[in-house]
Amino acid sequence: MLALGRFATAATTGAARPSARAVPLSLLGPLSLSVSAPVPLPGSLLFMHSAPPLRYFDVDEYILKRRKRLTMSTATAKHHAPFKRVESVQNIIHMHRDPFKVTVIGSGNWGTTIAKVVAENTVLNPHLFAQRVDMWVFEEDIDGEKLTEIINTKHQNVKYLPGIDLPHNLVANPSLTDSVKGADILVFNVPHQFLPRIVSQLKGHVSPSVRAISCLKGFEVGAKGVQLLSSYITDELEIQCGALSGANLAPEVAKEHWSETTVAYQLPEDFKGEGLDVDHRVLKALFHRPYFHVNVIDDVAGISIAGALKNVVALACGFVEGLGWGNNAAAAIQRVGLGEIIKFGQMFFPESRVETYYQESAGVADLITTCSGGRNVKVAKYMATQNKDAFEAEKELLNGQSAQGVITCKEVHEWLAKCELTEDFPLFEAVYQIVYNGMPMEQIPEMIDELEPFEVEDDTPEAEPQTEVQA
């Protein structure tokens, strides 16, 4: 017997009509065929087997029923799930927008690394992204040549990312306003102390429809209180801005050693719809590489807080490493630091989610990586071993770049002092006092010794008491 799912079944009475229309298999879609007797299948046409008789698939009847279904009123159809799926597919097919143009603002080692990732992905996704990626470069002279000319001809950033070949579709642009002309997506990646000046220059040159991702680490403390840098960009430029953060040391990502990161983005109120605007799918296509795995979430606050405060903790780890206190001390610093990061987030950004700190690369993984190496540890260790202050250490070690923890610990102190809460964050306060007031590093254990555990609020409803069942 030949079984055709719901389209044809064995009949108990009657025979196939002589006028029955043969049906191309392609019209029936994927069907489960079970054949117990030879059935001729010439070409792509299915002819009904004569014995036992089958109730044939009546094409005319099917077409009439299908037309009737498709003429349902709009009020009924919009609640019909299959219809909604078809409607969604039709919208995607018929709508069209030009590929998203991407600009990276910043060309330090992390800025250039992210620009490399983005430029590689635009080539792989020409239907989504314009092929040219502009990277704004603060112009400098390198042995008589302009840095932008070196990048555009030799395709290497010889000052901040030497030895790494850059995609040829990545164009260094010394003009900030020209680099963002026509851009749909901006990726901010500059030292965060320069952000206010950059944002002020961009005002009037960026459309409200532009979307942005901030790779910056830190806070903006001002009249509005303590702000995430992504929120600061949103407020100042009136554009939607998310964040990227994770366990990513720039040289390792640039060398294409496998790592992972977190991108956080919330769809704006003026979201134009799938295929017409930036969403999680677009961001994954923009940043994900075989060597750079991306998870996209919507907790912008969580990954921004973790990304900023881990630099302060890393300074403390550098201090104890420079003192020669070993791995046990570093582990204790990281434990206390993670607690203060979570406490800060819960106090001042209650929309942040605790699980982000544990489950995402931007949380505890980034903390471990940053405390194991990187600029903040290097500067702090140099301070401990060479008896230098933070700014001397930056100048001698970082080739014109900065350790973000040095600025962030000051911003955090100013905010906590204003709130009269410095005693609730003894590790953060210790780092500030060491960097700016010369407090001996050996006092760190004494300062954090009296720290009371911080209880994270649990919104999980209490389980009802279970009744013991007697055997």
Image: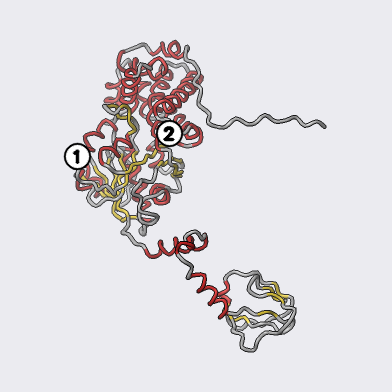
Name the foreground residue: 313 vs 97: 97
Per the model, the C-alpha gap separating discs 2 and 1 is: 31 Å
Q: As drawn, which residue projects farthest toward the bottom?
A: 18
Q: Residues within 10 Å of mark 2 (few under 14, many from 20)?
A: few
Q: Position of residue 304 (x, y in %)?
A: 39, 34
Q: Quadrant of residue 462?
A: top right
Name the foreground residue: 200 vs 75: 75
Name the foreground residue: 268 vs 256: 268
Which residue is painted at 30% across and 29% down in the image?
Answer: 220
Q: Nearer the viewer, mark 2 or mark 1?
A: 2
Q: Quadrant of residue 33?
A: bottom right
In the picture, the quarter occupied by the C terminus is top right
Q: Which of the labelled discs sits on residue 255, or is there none?
A: none
- SS under mark 2: loop
Name the foreground residue: 40 vs 355: 355
Q: Position of residue 242 (x, y in %)?
A: 36, 41
* Mark 2, residue position: 351
- SS under mark 1: helix
Type of the residue with mark 2: Glu
Relative to 260, residue 41 above or below? below
Q: Which of the labelled discs sits on residue 201, or is there none?
A: 1
Q: Position of residue 4 (x, y in %)?
A: 65, 73
Relative to 22, residue 69 above or below? above
Type of the residue with mark 1: Gln
In the picture, the quarter occupied by the N terminus is bottom right
